[in-house]
Image: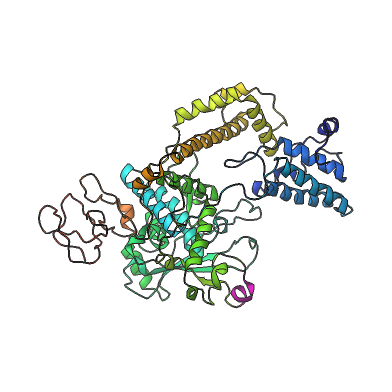
Amino acid sequence: MAQADGQDELIYSSDLDIVKPDPPSSRVKALAFLLEPGRVKPGVDLSTAETLVRFLDKLLAETVPHGWKKTVPSEDAFKKGWSVLQNYLVDKHESKWEPTTYIELKIKTWFNAAVLNNRLIRGVSQPRHFVTFIVLHNLLDTWFSSAFMEGSMSFDVTLAKSLSIVMMMAIDWRLGDFMLKFTSTRRQMYMTLGDIKLRLDGIGDPKDVTSVVAEVTIRYQKGEELDAHTHTRRVESYKDSRFDLIDFILLFVAHCLRHSLFAAGSSLDEVLAAAAKRLDGQLVFQDPTLPFNAALQSEPNQRLLNLAKPVTPHQAEATLEQMGNLAGYLPRLVAHDIRRGCAKDLAKLDKSLMKTHNSGSARAMGHQDKSMGQHYNWGKDEALVVHKANLHATAIDNALLRSHEPYQAPHKTELADQVSSFIMTKEEDVLRIVDDYLRTHPDLATQGSQRSVHFFLAPRPRPNEDSYLEWQAVRTRIIQRVKWKARQNWEDEVAAIDPVESASKKPKLTNDASRSLPHNKNNSCVVAPPAIKVIREQQCLDTCKEDICKEDIYKEDTCKEDICKADTCKEDIYKADTCKEEPSQ
């Protein structure tokens, strides 16, 4: 019943072919792209239970699963598609059609049979990981250390990429709540500079950047994109140099100064002085309509930022994956892992911090709480990220398997050879990818492709040719599969290493922040580029041989193993192999 017999399937297959649709208003977010209105040829009646079952069955047979280590599609995706199809049928038949009990029973039976036959996956197919505050700090430490030691094509890009990740940890919300939404057809939905109000707190030295606080307004929360109501988070600096690399205030101010986004002043001192003269103590932006974080430019200037182009969740996802590769984490990290880590961190906080003004951990995570949060508090909450710096590392923070060596992705030359081998040896898989692309992309003029697999071995067509989109999309899908296979082989090799030997090379994470700046072979501090000086002059932490960094300021011409009397390191950057005579105050 759930799957049509061979003879009936042949009959219905010729009638239920999917034609080229209109451009979908909602992209593949719900993965219902195969069930949207217009996907069925005119004249085909989908109002009966038997026809609907055969339609879903043929659709499932031709669907190529998307996702990491995914062999079959998800049941949840098809159920969302089924709800879209029901709305289409109601609209087509002008409310004369409704899902009867018989139809619902047939569809439910089909879903159960598809799961039992391993044609659909029920539930979560991917393992869930937790990128907590401590884990993210380690990722950012590795990220900036790699940029300092190995170089970066553009430090503007390095800083901007990390800013999106730190923002998610700072406000405990989703990427889609403050980044460009793919479903925004009526208007552009993303956070702008005007949604982040920087002002002097009035507590501490007004000449210090740590006295700046941010009031972050979230206008496009999930499920409330079109509502006039907004949510506000008050984000503070950690005021602790150990956490500079994960401090949203410092990173955001550095980003704005590097691109002259402030209306008054071109240096940190000038900007803070101008804010101190204002009654509200606000750091004013030149153009508040610009996105709060810029995206990369298109080819050929992909190493530069386009300040008018809002960043997308895809760029943040790719950044987090790069950070995980550099840190040697075996699991492939995704942005939602940060949100899971935020929930773990909030669960470890003292319950006394969950006051009325933030309405508990559910409110802090952006879940609805109209009785206390929206109606009385009006969505103005205090971000709890500053309290996470006091948390101690637990087994959850060290649960992610980590290699002592970073993951090296295949080189472009090696990748091209593997793609060519895949195309020549797996012709059937290539044709399935082609068919799936033709169904899900309305840009092509014809439905169906008569090209052989050798077409995708040829050089890339020019952008103005009709075959360019097809060649580019299919090759991209194949490259993605080859990359996944290479990473899987690396994970298997690392997992087979003796755990005792691996543990000796990989220290456990703690909340005692590791180095803020890398060191060269002479054990002297690497001079920070002008970009990072805006954040704060980082201290030289690794010159000491003890586990806890003491102050290494020597008065001789050459550095010796003396320990200064200060309890903490001064904010001093050494520009030579020898130390300065006096510490900076």
As drawn, the residue found furthest toward the left would be 556
Residue 362 drawn in magenta:
no
Residue visible at 83% across and 50% down in the picture: 105
Q: How many marks?
A: 0
Q: Position of residue 342 (x, y in %)?
A: 50, 61
Residue visible at 45% across and 57% down in the picture: 395
- From where the camera sits, is residue 437 visible? yes
Q: Nearer the viewer, residue 101 or 113?
A: 113
Q: On the rendered structure, is 471 left or right of 582?
A: right
- Magenta stretch bounds: 368-375
Q: Is residue 323 above or below residue 567?
A: above
Residue visible at 56% across and 28% down in the picture: 462
As drawn, the residue found furthest toward the right would be 96
Q: Nearer the viewer, residue 216 or 495?
A: 495
Q: Is residue 208 above or below residue 532?
A: below
The quadrant of the picture occupied by the N terminus is top right
- The secondary structure that dominates the magenta segment is helix
- From where the camera sits, is residue 466 visible? no
Q: Is residue 415 above or below residue 502?
A: above
Q: Position of residue 445 (x, y in %)?
A: 70, 32
The quadrant of the picture occupied by the C terminus is bottom left
Q: Position of residue 70 (x, y in %)?
A: 61, 41
Q: Position of residue 517 (x, y in %)?
A: 30, 53
Residue 370 drawn in magenta:
yes
Name the colouring of the figure. rainbow
